[in-house]
């Protein structure tokens, strides 16, 4: 954050209470004084819609109104019915979970939230369905929730006593050879692009764009994450240091705002809203129904480097961490490399890196000095041998290719009739249904990679491993990227700290699925709190060398006290003004989302 950003933030912050109390007016919007949504209603309270009114919404949406019921609701019956049995069988299948309007990909967070169905849901199949749901929620003072992929760690994809706009069935993907944004004719050159509806997952986009189309679109690493949610949160993929963030790749979006209007947002129309949905967080500014993203020439190859190294002593582990950081700075700190190194408590360094635009022999040559250094020292052993793999980039998300050549890398949706391309990386399956004990992230400034600062960084990394394991995700910091990538990221709402960060440090602890109604004792909250304390202590060690750094909104601490600064930094005042302009009454609410300071923690009671 530079001096100008600090001054801008300092000037704007005093006006935030006025913004969220409805005390400011904006050109083109008119006075909004007194225009505040009253506290929202629950099913047991006066004002909750009558059965006849719900029937009106059902007719308006072509019969696509439903009452979500958890498949675990019947598990208490004797014997458990087929719904319960199927849910227990498929609990680690993210595609099954995504097909359930009553479930979310994360089952909850200790002492924070637990996945619970909305009271009603509109299974939207078109933009008109979304408009009907938004209008109904506004007119009846309902808590409105939007779910695409349902991956939110913060629990923003679902809420009890709410009306859910469920986007799962809006999943079309359309490729363009020469796309020009509306209003951009004569002002913007046409470019290859892809238009994706908001219910699509990244595997849908990758299958169309890369496997079948031979191009690349910047998206998420996890194949089952929703396209719209990732873009609105900023959006990092394995190759972000080369292709930038997903938000920076957005050309145009269609969005339903709180007044029920369908707007086109791009650089020429509704430009403030366009900027706001590029990293401003999902669910706060409106319902994004479709997005158009630029596509890129596909490199010849994508590849990966895997391995794990065990140190025999604490001193040897510290030396290994120092070597890894030095090696990263001198050999990997560039647009070719992404993904992570995991620093484990048991004096083990796990390497899970990916690369683009290099042949396998080139990648092997780059890593040879590091592996030679390890092999030359008896205090180290390979817990997992180092492997360097490369493949034609077009096959990186090609399910059939992996079935034939590397079946262990991907896990398929094995339900009868499931699309053949619906797969996920085997390493991501641990997150399916997980119950979070603790979680946090911090952008690590590239200044820590300087020769003078590396010893301090290494000390912090080692100290953190004494508390809990964590990872440095190098693709989630943009330092080392091209000027073009950095400039595009500056034109998004994402915290500017990402520009100068070489990596995002992520530390988390979790337990098995703990959905309401599941058989068994449920989560061990004492154990969860103990592990959460370890996460807090580990992140505290890292923040000693990066005390003022921000955090990535999608992978952050639910209990972050300074969330406005942590998630958006100097961009938050501008985001708050966009929020007031498009949603002055506060219809859209998510935990720690833009404007949420005006509401109680559950989003039902207005505070100001």
Image (tube, grey):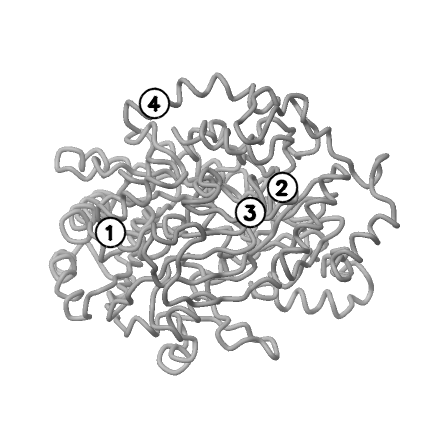
Quadrant of the image occupied by residue 93: bottom right
Give the distance between the C-alpha atoms of the residues marked 2 and 4, in whole angstroms. Answer: 34 Å
Return the disc, 3 or 2, that comes first in the chain's sequence.
2
Q: Residue at x 19, y 70 (%)?
A: 360
Q: In the image, is 205 to the left or to the right of 393?
A: right
**Location of mark 2 (residue):** 113
Q: Secondary structure at mark 1?
A: loop
Q: Nearer the viewer, residue 224 or 313?
A: 224
Quadrant of the image occupied by residue 513: bottom right
Mark 1 and mark 3 in contact? Answer it, CB < 8 Å: no
Return the disc, 4 or 3, that comes first in the chain's sequence.
4
Mark 3 and mark 2 in contact? Answer it, CB < 8 Å: no
Marking on residue 6: 4
**Location of mark 3 (residue):** 263
Q: Residue at x 54, y 52 (%)?
A: 151
Return the disc, 1 or 3, that comes first in the chain's sequence.
3
Give the distance between the C-alpha atoms of the residues marked 4 and 3, in whole angstroms. Answer: 32 Å
Q: Is residue 309 above or below residue 47?
A: below
**Location of mark 1 (residue):** 312
Which dot, 4 or 1, sits closer to the camera?
A: 4
Q: Is residue 412 above or below residue 2?
A: below
Which dot, 2 or 1, sits closer to the camera?
A: 2
Q: In the image, is 51 to the left or to the right of 414?
A: right
Residue 408 in the image: state x and y as whole percent.
41, 74
Counting other residues with Cα less than 10 Å from the Cα at mark 3, is it few (<14), some (14-19), or many (20 or more)?
Answer: some
Which dot, 3 or 2, sits closer to the camera?
A: 3
Give the distance between the C-alpha atoms of the residues marked 1 and 3, in whole angstroms. Answer: 60 Å
Give the distance between the C-alpha atoms of the residues marked 2 and 1, in whole angstroms. Answer: 41 Å
Mark 2 and mark 1 in contact? Answer it, CB < 8 Å: no
Quarter of the picture containing the C terminus is top right
Residue 363 in sight: yes
Residue 461 in the image: state x and y as whole percent.
28, 40
């Amino acid at each position: 954050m530079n001096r100008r950003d600090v001054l801008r933030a300092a000037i704007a912050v005093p006006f935030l209470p006025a913004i969220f109390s409805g005390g400011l007016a904006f050109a083109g919007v008119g006075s909004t004084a007194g225009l505040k949504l009253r506290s929202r209603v629950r099913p047991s309270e006066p004002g909750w819609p009558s059965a006849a009114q719900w029937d009106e919404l059902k007719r308006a949406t072509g019969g696509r109104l439903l009452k979500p019921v958890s498949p675990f609701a019947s598990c208490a019956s004797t014997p458990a019915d087929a719904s319960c049995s199927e849910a227990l069988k498929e609990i680690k299948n993210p595609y099954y979970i995504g097909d359930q309007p009553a479930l979310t990909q994360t089952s909850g967070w200790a002492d924070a939230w637990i996945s619970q169905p909305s009271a009603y849901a509109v299974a939207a199949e078109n933009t008109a369905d979304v408009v009907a749901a938004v209008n109904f929620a506004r007119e009846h003072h309902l808590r409105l929730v939007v779910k695409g992929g349902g991956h939110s760690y913060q629990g923003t994809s679902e809420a009890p006593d709410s009306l859910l706009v469920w986007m799962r069935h809006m999943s079309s993907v359309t490729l363009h050879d020469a796309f020009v944004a509306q209003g951009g004719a004569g002002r913007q050159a046409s470019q290859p692009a892809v238009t994706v509806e908001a219910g699509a997952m990244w595997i849908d986009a990758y299958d169309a764009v890369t496997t079948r189309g031979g191009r690349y679109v910047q998206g998420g690493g996890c194949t089952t994450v929703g396209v719209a949610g990732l873009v609105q949160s900023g959006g990092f993929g394995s190759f972000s240091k080369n292709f930038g963030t997903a938000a920076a790749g957005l050309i145009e979006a269609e969005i339903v705002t709180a007044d029920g209007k369908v707007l086109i947002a791009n650089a020429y129309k509704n430009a403030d809203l366009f900027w706001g949905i590029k990293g401003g967080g999902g669910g706060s500014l409106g319902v994004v129904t479709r997005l158009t993203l630029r596509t890129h020439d596909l490199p010849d190859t994508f590849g990966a480097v895997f391995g794990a190294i065990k140190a025999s002593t604490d001193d040897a582990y510290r030396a290994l961490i120092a070597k890894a950081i030095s090696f990263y700075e001198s050999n990997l700190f560039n647009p070719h490399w992404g993904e992570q190194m995991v620093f484990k408590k048991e004096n083990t360094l796990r390497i899970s890196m990916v690369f683009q635009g290099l042949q396998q022999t080139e990648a092997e040559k780059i890593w040879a000095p590091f592996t030679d250094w390890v092999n030359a020292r008896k205090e180290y052993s390979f817990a997992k041998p180092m492997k360097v793999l490369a493949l034609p980039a077009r096959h990186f998300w090609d399910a059939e290719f992996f079935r034939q050549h590397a079946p262990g890398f991907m896990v398929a949706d094995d339900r009868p009739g499931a699309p053949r391309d619906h797969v996920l990386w085997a390493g991501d399956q641990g997150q399916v249904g997980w119950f979070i004990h603790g979680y946090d992230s911090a952008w690590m400034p590239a200044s820590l990679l300087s020769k003078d600062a590396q010893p301090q960084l290494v000390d912090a990394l080692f100290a953190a491993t004494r508390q809990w394991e964590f990872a440095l995700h190098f693709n989630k910091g943009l330092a080392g990227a091209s000027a073009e990538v950095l400039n595009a990221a500056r034109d998004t709402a994402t915290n500017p700290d990402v520009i100068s960060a070489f990596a995002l440090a992520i530390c988390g602890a979790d337990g098995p699925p703990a959905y309401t109604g599941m058989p068994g004792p449920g989560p061990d909250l004492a154990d969860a709190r103990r592990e959460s304390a370890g996460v807090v202590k580990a992140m505290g060690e890292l923040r000693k060398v990066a005390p003022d750094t921000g955090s990535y909104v999608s992978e952050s601490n639910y209990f972050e006290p300074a969330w406005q600064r942590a998630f958006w930094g100097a961009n938050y005042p501008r985001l708050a003004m966009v929020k007031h302009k498009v949603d002055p009454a506060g219809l859209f609410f998510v935990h720690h989302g833009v404007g949420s300071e005006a509401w109680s923690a559950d989003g039902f009671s207005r505070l100001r």
